[in-house]
Image (cartoon, helix red, strand yellow):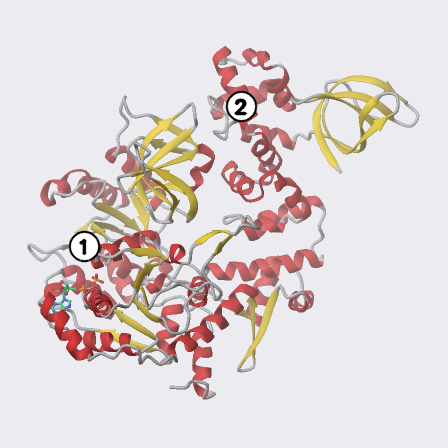
Amino acid sequence: MERIEGMINDIVFKNDDNGYTIAHLVNSESEVVIVGCMPTLSVGESIEVEGKWINHKTYGTQFEVNKFMPVTPSSLEGIYVYLSSGMIHGIGEKMAKRIVDKFGVNTLDIIQKMPERLKEVEGIGSKKIDQIVKSYEENRELRNIIIELSPYGITPNYCMKIYKKYKNKAIEVINKNPYKLAEDIRGIGFKIADNIASKIGIEKNSKDRVSQGILYALNQSLSSGHTYLPQNILIQESVKLLEVQSPIIEECIMDLIYDQKIHIEKMDGTNLIYLIPYYLSENGVCKQIIKLSQCEFKDLNIDIEKEIECVEEQEDIKLAKNQALAVKEAIENGVVIITGGPGTGKTTTINTIIKIFENNKQEVILAAPTGRAAKRMSETSSKEAKTIHRLLEMGYATDSDELKFMKNEEEPIKADVIIIDELSMVDILLMYSLLRAIKPGTRLILVGDSDQLPSVGAGNVLKDMIESSVINVVRLNEIFRQAQESMIVVNAHKINNGEPLHLNSKGKDFFFIKKDTNEEVLQEIVGLVNERLPKFYNVDKLKDIQILASMRKGDLGVTNLNIELQKYLNKSEKFKVEENFQKRLFRVGDKVMQIKNNYTKKWENEDRSDSGEGVYNGDIGYIYHIDKDKRTIYVLFDQVKIVAYKYDELDELDHSFCTTIHKSQGSEFPVVIIPITWAPPMLLSRNLLYTAVTRAKKLVVLVGDVKYLEYMIKNNKTNDRYSNLAYKLNKFREEGLLVK
Ligand SMILES: Nc1ncnc2c1ncn2[C@@H]1O[C@H](COP(=O)(O)OP(=O)(O)OP(=O)(O)O)[C@@H](O)[C@H]1O
């Protein structure tokens, strides 16, 4: 079945007895003859018809109508949302309202076929008409999605995401299974999908609906970090979500297991329910890490103590006992975890390990989970470090348009030693992908601080592996003298131990400024960034200072702080081009952040002598140029890479004068400012404060109310994650499956 839409501009024939009608329907592309039973049709009406093309012996090609629908008044809202969405150059909210008030459901037909009539709307002249017509033609498919979906409460921004995901199949996919939206589009919940489903006519007790609800509940649990849910919890969650009785949920869980959409596993009498990729990854990580850790390493016939002494001499240091132990374990074992807080010598230990292996002609490869963490690892080791995704060669296979890792068990990474930093950020899926690509015989050295926030994705990989005592773990717990001089390091450890902090010591690097109201906190932050810190610490207010907030919403949340800070840190000026797009104001000079991994996004330098692919979640850049005609914003990353974002790609960018603490994981900044105010208890937690503070290299300034600071230090409740990796690793040990 095909669908076409347009306005009836002529009725050629109508049989009043049976409703058979022949009419002319016009739209922007053509004028077509439609035939079928349409008894109520009248000239000037906008309709959508469903049917098929036929070839009439005498009259040629016609569209045989099976079903016809008037463009409903709800579409009026869709048309308004579309016109005011920023997609159409030159139309804002007020103008959109004036146009829709004037032309009603015929608005789009007017734009397509009689654009001159737009002049009847106050404020529209020939130039504006040209702009409107041009943009209207440019985003045809997206336009349909916005018009169709906005009556369900889906914003243009989400329509854009939907369009990116399904392209021209969007409406078809949604009509077939609206719940796909909740599964595939971050930010669209089950409720919205369910709302669409109920309008399409899907019943509450339908098995399709219940199954989708169960899958959705499991998918939701991933964002809390769970790799599985106990069956009784899954049933409870599903009852709440679907408002149906539990027997039908239990029945649908069984069907989903049978259809291999989910997996059930028993642990000590409890049923654990997994989404398949998470089950495979958890099991895979367990088996693979054990396999790697059981390899014997007799290849390097070296005197480790002598090798360490040699590096100590070169570097003029003496390794602490546990640092030396870490080096030894790394050389003698297939897998070792090196863990410790700031200033405990992880970097020094990694560098010693690299030197010893390289002195012995072993190929060492370095990687970290994010672009910024990899960059930092490169800087501290003076050796190239890749992101794990690049190490695994993420790309498109020749026969598919799906991104996948080219490195795997068939095509493993060629290296003698692989060192991964910031392991706390690695989730269970990425860990499995990494381990699959490491062949037994390659040494794997995992480095991380298990007190940092856990990975954004599901699992508790670093903590579980440490807890399992199946893998060699070396804890670095001595804070070196040099590091002890930094109150950032000292206080970070105090935060971890739940102790009061050293604040405002003269000449030091850790300050607390008391402010009572949100407005005062805001003004203080502005004053610090805009004047005092650049003046007294000789830092660049945009590049060197990072404001980190725990939440997005609220006066002191990331969204509002960015709006406020933009006014001071990158003021509007005549020569700075700016553009309003979907309620956000982008201005040349703005500090922005890429908020998702985009492995194929192209960059090039200014004179186009160098180019490449890939912009990663957390990369910070500056708006370099805005081309209004091309509807493109150019962002400069790493001082040389220029990346072009079409306006419809702006959902990948966020302002980043202020970012969330979560997004700052793996990055470091000279100066960090943290507002300390009320937030939900979950966001007033010890590990959030610890992560934020440890991002700073030179200076930390906390601004707000000390009672919330004290609360954060005490609140060491972390949301427990359902993850079974530690249990599974231990089971291997208990069952005697470990060789060593
Ligand atoms: N064995 C040692 N003897 C003396 N100083 C050391 C030793 N190991 C490390 N240091 C010093 O301690 C400080 C912290 O070390 P390093 O940077 O290696 O720690 P880290 O754990 O990587 O810290 P961070 O996580 O904060 O980057 C550095 O100034 C380093 O030179």
Position of the C terminus, as image quadrant, is: bottom left
Residue 604: % across, % down: 35, 37
- Whether residue 736 is visible here, answered yes or no, is yes
Q: Which residue is mark 1?
A: 697
Position of the N terminus, as image quadrant, is: top right
Q: Earlier in the sequence, mark 1 or mark 2?
A: 2
Residue 247: % across, % down: 69, 68
Q: Nearer the viewer, residue 248 or 585?
A: 585
Identify which amino acid the numbered label 1 is placed on.
Lys
**Mark 2, residues whose alpha carbon is within 10 Å: few (<14), some, or many (≥20)?**
some
Q: Relative to 234, is 660 above or below?
A: above
Q: Nearer the viewer, residue 366 or 368?
A: 366
Q: Give how far apart the Cα atoms at labels 1 and 2 are.
A: 51 Å
Q: Which residue is mark 2?
A: 97
Identify which amino acid the numbered label 2 is placed on.
Lys
Residue positioned most to the left: 506
Q: Is residue 418 left or right of residue 546?
A: right
Q: Residue at x 54, y 11 (%)?
A: 119
Residue 72: % across, % down: 68, 31
Q: Nearer the viewer, residue 13 or 466?
A: 466
